[in-house]
Image (cartoon, grey):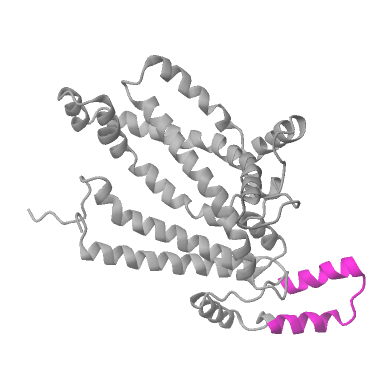
């Protein structure tokens, strides 16, 4: 492959494996550092709802044995890795007998659909605005208008989501306030259901895009300004190339690399979901599922979602490292033999 060496690919692959191992180990350790345990917490919630529970200690002991929580920590750790390799995260501790992966699998499409659209729009719009703000040949009137598009960046996206719910959903009654779809439609691959899902996704997507695209824009603006002074950029202008070719091929193409790295690092967020946004809009994605799992100390569901985040993020960064020489010909990992 152009610009790559076998040694570099092997090095990055080993680093990829190390990242997954370290991240997954932390996911195993951190929940167990919290005081208490999920079984005792579950029995405590049952006692609050139903009153006194007879033989609570025996019940707790039997359930700990059922989920393997009575074993020494190193035994739990090896069992955990065995389950990870088999993609078997066991039963949910708070929704037994539902399996953890069943809960994640049901929530995953909602977060992927919502956040993929939101991330692509936010990245594309933000990078375009930032590139135009940092390019010296951008028309003056456009440079005056573009900064106003970043007004909502200073507002936290969950606060902006609350504002949208109040104004658009309650006051104007244009769009639904919460949920992924209305109960009056039948779920399935039919036009009424798809239209209903898209209608419910508009407010969450808008709240994320308008408040996050400013970060991409400001970062890209700084990168574009630095590219303006590069020799190859000035040479392209002296040669009389068309402005569009200079802008995209010599400007955006060379300035976008750090933004692509940040995008790759943020791809794990497509799996974790946007917890606060999904909570505010009652959206049944992995973000809300992860929130519920953390609150209820549901180790298995938390580990399933977190390991998926680690795998997606590490894989994205690994692939991006291999693609860098194809994006920018100046980048090479071959040693200079001179």
Query: x%, y% of residue 313?
Result: 45, 57
Query: x%, y% of residue 267?
Result: 47, 52
| Left or right: 67, with 108 as reference point | right
| Left or right: 156, with 19 as reference point | right
The residue under the point 26% across, 25% down is 243
Query: x%, y% of residue 141?
Result: 42, 15
The residue under the point 15% across, 56% down is 335
In the rendered image of this protein, does residue 275 appear above or below residue 162? below
The residue under the point 25% across, 34% down is 250
Query: x%, y% of residue 146?
Result: 46, 23
View extreme (left): residue = 338
Place residue 39 in its image quadrant.
Answer: bottom right
In the rendered image of this protein, does residue 216 appear above or below residue 104? above
Instruction: Residue 83: tell me if it is visible.
Output: yes
* Residue 229 vs residue 130, the one in the foreground: 130
Query: For the N terminus, which image quadrant?
Result: bottom left
The residue under the point 78% across, 70% down is 42
* Residue 256 vs residue 78, the one in the foreground: 256
Q: Check if residue 65 falls in the magenta segment.
A: yes
* Residue 286 vs residue 230, the one in the foreground: 286
Place residue 198 in its image quadrant.
Answer: top right
In the rendered image of this protein, does residue 73 appear above or below residue 162? below
Q: Main secondary structure of the magenta part?
A: helix
* Residue 293 vs residue 193, the one in the foreground: 193
Instruction: Residue 37: tell me if it is visible.
Output: no
| Left or right: 261, with 280 as reference point | left
Q: Check if residue 50 falls in the magenta segment.
A: yes
View extreme (top): residue = 141
Magenta stretch: give its range: 38-66
């Amino acid at each position: 492959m152009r610009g790559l060496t076998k040694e570099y690919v092997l090095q990055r692959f080993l680093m990829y494996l190390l990242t997954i191992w370290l991240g997954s180990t932390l996911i195993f350790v951190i929940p167990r550092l919290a005081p208490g345990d999920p079984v005792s917490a579950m029995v405590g919630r049952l006692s609050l709802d139903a009153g006194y529970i007879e033989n609570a200690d025996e019940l707790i002991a039997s359930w700990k044995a059922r989920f393997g929580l009575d074993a020494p920590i190193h035994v739990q750790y090896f069992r955990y890795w065995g389950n990870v390799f088999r993609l078997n995260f066991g039963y949910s501790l708070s929704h037994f007998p539902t399996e953890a992966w069943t809960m994640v699998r049901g929530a995953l499409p909602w977060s992927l659909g919502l956040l993929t659209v939101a991330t692509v729009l936010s990245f594309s719009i933000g990078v375009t605005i930032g590139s135009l703000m940092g390019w010296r040949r951008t028309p003056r009137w456009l440079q005056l208008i573009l900064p106003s598009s970043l007004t909502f960046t200073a507002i936290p996206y969950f606060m902006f989501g609350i504002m949208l719910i109040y104004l658009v959903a309650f006051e104007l009654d244009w769009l639904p306030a919460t949920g992924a779809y209305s109960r009056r439609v039948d779920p399935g691959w039919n036009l009424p259901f798809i239209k209903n899902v898209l209608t419910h996704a508009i407010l969450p997507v808008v709240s994320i895009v308008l408040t996050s695209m400013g970060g991409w824009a400001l970062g890209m603006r700084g990168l574009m300004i630095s590219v303006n002074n590069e020799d190859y950029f000035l040479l392209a202008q002296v040669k009389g190339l068309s402005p569009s070719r200079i802008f995209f091929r010599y400007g955006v193409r060379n300035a976008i690399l750090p933004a692509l790295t940040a995008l790759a690092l943020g791809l794990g967020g497509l799996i974790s979901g946007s917890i606060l946004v999904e909570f505010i809009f009652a959206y049944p994605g992995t973000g809300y599922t992860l929130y519920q799992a953390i609150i209820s100390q549901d180790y298995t569901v938390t580990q399933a979602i977190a390991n998926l985040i680690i795998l997606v993020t590490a894989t994205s960064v690994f692939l991006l490292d291999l693609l860098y020489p194809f994006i920018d010909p100046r980048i090479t990992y071959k040693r200079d033999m001179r």
